[in-house]
Image: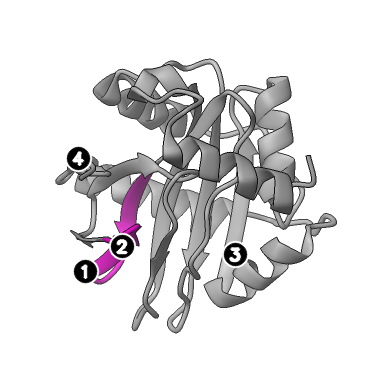
C-alpha cells in the first residue's frame, strides 16, 4: 500500500498575503490572450468557468515546454516580487529544487470545477504541484483514491503527473495559486521502474504525442 500521496500545511499564507493576491488579480487583471491550446485542455478549461493564466517563472527549456502544453492562453513570465517570495517559501518548505518552476493562477466563478486529469510531464521528471487556496469555500480535493479537506490559506502539494486529481463543483468564487515544480524522479524517491512513473510515461506518450 502506498504512503500518503500529499502534503498539507494549514494557514500557509497570511490574511494580508491572501488580500494582496486578490488585489493583484482584480486590479492588474490576468489579461489572458488566447493561444492555440490542445483539445484536451480546451475541455478541462470549459469546466473551470473562469480564467486560468500560466506564468513561466524559470524560463528554462523544460518549463517552456510544460507551460506551453498546459496553457489555454499565451504564457507570461513576469510576476510581482511578493509572488516570487511565496514561491520561494513553498520551495524551501518542501525542500524542492528551484531549477524548473512555473505558476498557474486560477480565478473560478460559482459553478466551476476541476475535471479529473493528470498534469503534463516530461521524461525523467515529475510535475509536482503545490496549490494555495486564496479564496474559497472549504472543499475536497481528490488525489487518486484520497480525499483531502482544504480551507482558505492552506497549502497542499502532490505529484500531479502521477495521480489523477479533481474537485466537485464549487458553490462560490474560488481563487488559487498552483505552483509547479518539475523535479527529477529521485527527489520524491521514484525511479524509472516505479509503476506510477511507467503509467505517467504512457499518458505522456498518448496525450503529448511524444
Give x and y (percent) for residue 164: 44, 57
For residue 48, what is the image quadrant?
Answer: bottom right
34 is higher (above) or lower (below) than 200? below
* The label number, if any, that marks residue 138 in the structure image: 1
Q: Are marks 1 and 4 in contact (CB under 8 Å)?
A: no
Residue marked by disc 2: 141
Q: Residues within 10 Å of mark 4 (few under 14, many from 20)?
A: few
Determine whether, in the image, residue 53 is placed left or right of residue 69.
left
- Of mark 1 and mark 3, the one earlier in the sequence is 3
Q: Report the Cα–Cα distance between label 3 and label 2.
A: 19 Å
Q: Nearer the viewer, mark 1 or mark 3?
A: 1
Q: Gap between marks 2 and 4, in whole Å? A: 17 Å
- Residue 139: x and y in percent read 25, 69
- Distance in Å between CA atoms under marks 2 and 1: 10 Å
Q: Residue at x 50, y 70 (%)?
A: 115
Q: Give, as a single range, the part of the protein colored magenta.
A: 130-145
Q: Secondary structure at mark 3?
A: strand
Q: Is residue 51 above or below residue 21?
A: below
Q: State yes or no: residue 132 in magenta.
A: yes
Callout 4 secondary element: loop
Asked whether disc 1 touches disc 3, contact meaning CB atoms under 8 Å apart, the reply is no
Q: Secondary structure at mark 1?
A: loop
Relative image position of residue 82 (x, y in whole percent): 41, 31
Question: Which of marks 2 and 3 precedes in the sequence?
Answer: 3
Q: Tell me the SS state at disc 2.
A: strand
Q: Determine the residue located farthest toward the left in the rendered image.
A: 10
Q: Which mark is residue 51?
A: 3
Q: Earlier in the sequence, mark 4 or mark 3?
A: 4
User: What is the C-alpha distance between the residues marked 1 and 3?
Assistant: 20 Å
In the rendered view of the protein, which quadrant contains the C terminus?
A: top right
Q: Would you call the spot at circle 1 few (<14 residues within 10 Å), some (14-19), or many (20 or more)? A: few
Amino acid at each position: 500500500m502506498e504512503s500518503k500521496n500529499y502534503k498539507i500545511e494549514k494557514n500557509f499564507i497570511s490574511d494580508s498575503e491572501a488580500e494582496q493576491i486578490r488585489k493583484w488579480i482584480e486590479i492588474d487583471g490576468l489579461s489572458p490572450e488566447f493561444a492555440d491550446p490542445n483539445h484536451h485542455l480546451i475541455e478541462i478549461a470549459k469546466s473551470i468557468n473562469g480564467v486560468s493564466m500560466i506564468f513561466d517563472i524559470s524560463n528554462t527549456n523544460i518549463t517552456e515546454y510544460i507551460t506551453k502544453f498546459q496553457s489555454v492562453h499565451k504564457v507570461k513570465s513576469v510576476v510581482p516580487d511578493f509572488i516570487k517570495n511565496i514561491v520561494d517559501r513553498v520551495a524551501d518548505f518542501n525542500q524542492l529544487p528551484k531549477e524548473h518552476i512555473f505558476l498557474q493562477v486560477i480565478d473560478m466563478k460559482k459553478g466551476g470545477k476541476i475535471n479529473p486529469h493528470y498534469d503534463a510531464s516530461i521524461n525523467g521528471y515529475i510535475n509536482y504541484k503545490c496549490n494555495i487556496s486564496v479564496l474559497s469555500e472549504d472543499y475536497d480535493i481528490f488525489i487518486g483514491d484520497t480525499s483531502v479537506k482544504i480551507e482558505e490559506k492552506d497549502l497542499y502539494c502532490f505529484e500531479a503527473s502521477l495521480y489523477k486529481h479533481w474537485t466537485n463543483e464549487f458553490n462560490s468564487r474560488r481563487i488559487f495559486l498552483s505552483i509547479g515544480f518539475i523535479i527529477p524522479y529521485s527527489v520524491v524517491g521514484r525511479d524509472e521502474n516505479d509503476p506510477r512513473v511507467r503509467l505517467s510515461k504512457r499518458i505522456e506518450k498518448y496525450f503529448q504525442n511524444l
